[in-house]
Image (cartoon, rainbow, N blue to C red):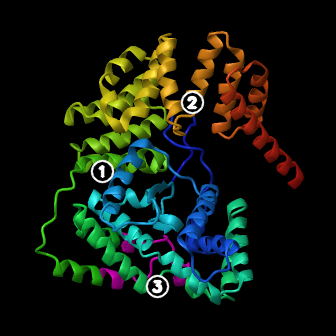
Amino acid sequence: MLSGVEIPKDIKYRIDMKPLKSKLLSTIVAIVLVVFLSFSQALALSVKEEKEMAEKFMTMIRKQMTLIDDPLALSLVREIGKRVVAQLPPQPFEYTFHIVDSDQFNAFASPGANIFVNRGLITSLDNSDELAGILGHESGHAACRHISQMIDKSKLVNIGTLAGVLAGVLVGAKGGGDSAQAVVMGTLATGQTAMLAYSRENEEEADQKGLAYIKKAGFSPDGLLTGLEKIRANDWYGTESIPGYLKTHPGSKERIIYIQSWLQDHIKEPVIDNGIDPSRFEMVKYRLAGLYGYEDATETMLMKMLKQQPDNAAVHYGLALVLVRKSRLDQALSHLKQGLALKVFDPWLLMELGRVYVLKGEPEKALEVLQGLDSVADLKLPFLFYRGSARHDLGLLDKAKEDFTGVVEADCTTFPRVYYNLASIAGKEGKQGLSHYYLGLYYHKINDGKNALFHLEKSLPDLIDSDRIEKAGKIISELKKQKKIVLFKS
């Protein structure tokens, strides 16, 4: 199991890193219920109410957890998710799929059909069938509106109890530690805690729906079984100290028996081809491991794997990503070339090779390697960023600006460095106000409020574009408000 680490903000594929307290995930359903109850006293949720709750919940999720905004990994997860959801009858919600930067073996559905799967769970799976099984199960919960049903149970729970749960979660988010968890556990011990988990009937229904969905989508339903077996073997939350009623997916042994029986009843039914290249899942798996796992532990693990599987290009790829993080660029280059020898013209390996050449200060080689990758949809944003970086280093400022502007227009948070580079270009063009504006956005993206405020305020007198003036003013207002809150608390 792999754990997350901080990755340098200027060259890595990720959003701002915040500490993710592993124990908080065990209370995720409690958070849902607190948000729900604070909004409405009703015994059940209407579709409109659940959509409004979903927005509140997503805001809380982004504060409590770090979501991975990697275009390559998200593309696969969302493609599989959409294929599964396409098998559902008409739904009142738009399903979304997200990757949580946590090494825990977990996945969950939130209000409004937002599905979350942890990085650690993805890196523990072996194929897209298993990932489809997990997503199918969670989609089953959403389609059956099991969370809405849990609101009906919540009438048995004192509002103060739930407020205590939320307080414990917030303490854990800000200060962490066992004391915060004790607040949660102590408060729950006095309330009706049975409603904080899906019932076994809920789980069986979600499994039944999920199995049908993934099979129609062209994935092997065996994937849900083998995926669940992996989760059970590693313990869903990685600890036995968490009370069973806090585990959102109970009865795994019984579920395995049920799924085995279902598979036996449907063994003769053919499975259609889902059209997803099996090697693509492998590349995503080792990409997530290489970019987000503990550096030393991941390097050791992948080196051992290479001894057993020296011809696995995906393992070479993952190892190269780790080595880049450790600034061992020549070794990374070696593994990328070995991977390309095994998988000639693989676009993912070529993209990473271009990135390493940019980092090594060899922009000509980078442009040569990146040529033609603009036709690969999944690679569009990294292609534009690294081609723009190479062009920038070569002094091709107009062309670099075109590439960087394409990244900005996509509103992608993966490459905050793009704003720094645009600031550099604007400075060289003598546009100091625009340079300060982009520097302000860069520091805002990497959560350096002090520098963001300085540069955005500096930009305003010289900005001409009304949209930029409005955006800068809005961010300045938010930063000043945050600053006042910090001063007040101190």
Question: Residue drawn at (43%, 33%), measured in percent from left and top?
Answer: 381
As drawn, the label of residue 417 is 2
Q: Quadrant of residue 337?
A: top left
Q: In the rendered view, would you say 232 is above or below 10?
A: below
In the current view of this chain or complex, which residue is farthest to the left?
268
Which quarter shows the N terminus? bottom left
- Distance from Cα at disc 3 to Cα at disc 1: 32 Å
Q: Position of residue 106 (x, y in %)?
A: 45, 66
Range covered by the magenta-colored residues: 231-256
Q: In the rendered view, would you say 44 is above or below 427?
A: below
Question: Residue drawn at (67%, 75%), measured in percent from left and top?
Answer: 40
- Distance from Cα at disc 2 to Cα at disc 1: 28 Å
As drawn, the label of residue 73 is none
Marks 2 and 1 close (CB-CB < 8 Å): no
- Numbered disc 3: secondary structure: loop
| Residue 70 shown in magenta | no
Q: In the rendered view, would you say 23 is above or below 55?
A: below
Marks 3 and 1 close (CB-CB < 8 Å): no
- Say which residue label 1 marks: 281
Q: Earlier in the sequence, mark 3 or mark 1?
A: 3
Q: Is residue 14 visible?
A: yes
- Say which residue label 3 marks: 199
